[in-house]
Every structure is written in structure tokens, then in C-alpha cells.
Amino acid sequence: MAITVKRVAGALGAEISGVDLSKELDGPTFDAIHRAFVDHEVIFFRDQSLTPEQHKAFGRRFGSLNIHPYVKGMDGHPEIMEIIKEPTDKLNFGGGWHSDMSFLETPSIGSILYAVEVPDFGGDTLFASMTKAYDTLSPGLKQTLEGLRAVHSANREYSAQGASAQKRGSMQVADAEGMAGEFTHPVVKVHPVTGRKALYVNPAFTLRFEGWKERESKPLLDYLFDHARYEAYTCRFQWRAGSIAFWDNRSVWHFALNDYPGQRRHMRRVTVDAV
């Protein structure tokens, strides 16, 4: 297939056309999609029609699929998370800046989100490049961060009082408090394909720096969080039914906007584990 890759913003993001993801991809087409994924950090597709099996098959071209430890998967397809906000739900799932699954010992490569049903207005997703966020730090701060590791955990976000639990609405979300471990990851992550450096902390799952108290960590983490969501590092995707977004969790944050009161939004997500 001859595909077209069109950049959507200065910091990150590209829309790919000329491909039907319900079909098995030949080698050159897959290579072109993979290249766009690592070059642009998040890629978008329109007018797709995927069954759950086809959705999983596309994800498996990039690696094994994750089964979320705290959110119940789709019946018969535990690898697929159904993200549903009913008209009566007030809060939404994913409504804050974060990187998926950084709370795992081996975090995921990326997430592939497919739109089944979208509201008449609103419900866009914002994405932010942590590569751009790192590149624009001062040399002194880069040097400070280089040797640091940060502690990530699902305990706070997925506790009974946590944001994800409160936003579950019609979804089945387990209480992870006291169950989730704490894992450390480098604050500066080197992408295994491009070799580029990116900030690897996020407001949802990063608790503190390794060897630091949370109170000591907070001022620097807050600065990094504020810096990383600067508008110039972001792009915005307006969903239509059949749209797909595939983002690199190693270098991208995302934020699902909750600006469609009284409407239904139904998405399906598979997450690709690291090899």
C-alpha cells in the first residue's frame, strides 16, 4: 500500500492515510507506519473499521499486548480496555496529563485507541511531547536530571479516592491501594529506536525521586510537570467514529478532555508491552 504521512503540529503528531488497518499489513507498509510512529511520537488514522480481533492483530505487530491490572477488559478480549463515558457520568477516565502504564516494572511501548462512538462535540485528546520538553530544558537542569530516577506507582491514582477510580463511571476499576508496587525509572529516558532523550515523569503516577522524600521532590516535579505541558509541545486530535490514535508512551503524555456533558463516548484501547 502507498501511504501518506502528513504532519499535524510542530512538536509531534502525524496523520496517516492510504491504509486499511483491518487488513494484514505487508512488510514495507508496516515499516513505514513504524517509522512514522517513532519519528512523530503519535500517529493518527481516519475511517477505519476494526473488529476487536483486528484491533488486537494490529497491536501485536508491534509487540505483546498488556492486560491492565486494575481495569476490567472487554468481555472475551481482556487485552482491550473499553473506555466508556455514559451521558450520566460526570467525570471521564484519562482526564489528566499522564503516560500510560509507567507504574509497571517494565512500562509499555505505546497505546492504540480506537473510537467506536464519539459525542457530537468535544471529547478531543491532547498529546504532549516529552522529547520537546527535555530538549528545551537548560543545560544545568539536564545535567541535574541525568542521574536521577523517579518512583512510579498506581497506588495513588487507582486508590478508592484516586482520580482514576473516581472517573470510572460505568467502567470496572479495581482499588489498587496497598496492592500496587513502586518501581523506579530514569527521569531522562533514552528512546531505544531514535536515541533521543525524553522526560519520563508524569503527574498521575510519579510519586518522588528515588532517595528523596515526597516533600523534597514536589517543587522540582511540579516545575517539570508545568514545563512539559507548555502549549508549544502539544497537538490536539479531534475524534470521529473510526479514528485511531497510536502514541508512544516512552515519550508522550496525553489528556482526554471532558467537555461533552450529557453525551456518550465509547473508545477501545490496546496497549503494547515492551519486549
Image (tube, rainbow, N blue to C red):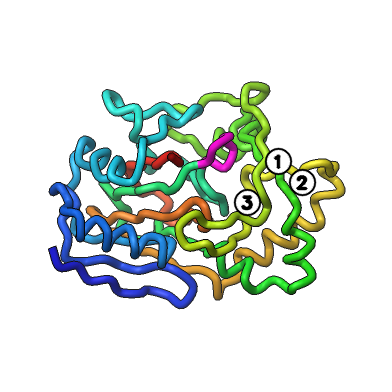
Q: Is 159 left, or right, of 253 in this rendering?
A: right
Magenta segment main secondary structure = loop
Residue 192 vs residue 65, the one in the foreground: 192
The three-letter amino acid code for the residue at tag 3 is: Asn
Q: Earlier in the sequence, mark 3 or mark 1?
A: 1
Disc 2 to disc 3, how far (Cα)? 12 Å
Labels 1 & 2 near each other (Cβ < 8 A): yes
* Magenta-drawn segment: 101-107
The three-letter amino acid code for the residue at tag 1 is: Val
Count residues near mark 3 (Cα–Cα under 10 Å), then give few for <14, some for 14-19, many for 20+. Answer: many
Disc 3 to disc 1, how far (Cα)? 11 Å
Mark 1 = which residue? 151
Q: Quadrant of residue 239?
A: bottom left
**Residue plotted at (59% across, 38% down):** 103
Mark 3 = which residue? 202
Disc 1 to disc 2, how far (Cα)? 6 Å
Mark 2 = which residue? 209
**Residue plotted at (57% across, 62% down):** 130
Residue 273 vs residue 20, the one in the foreground: 273
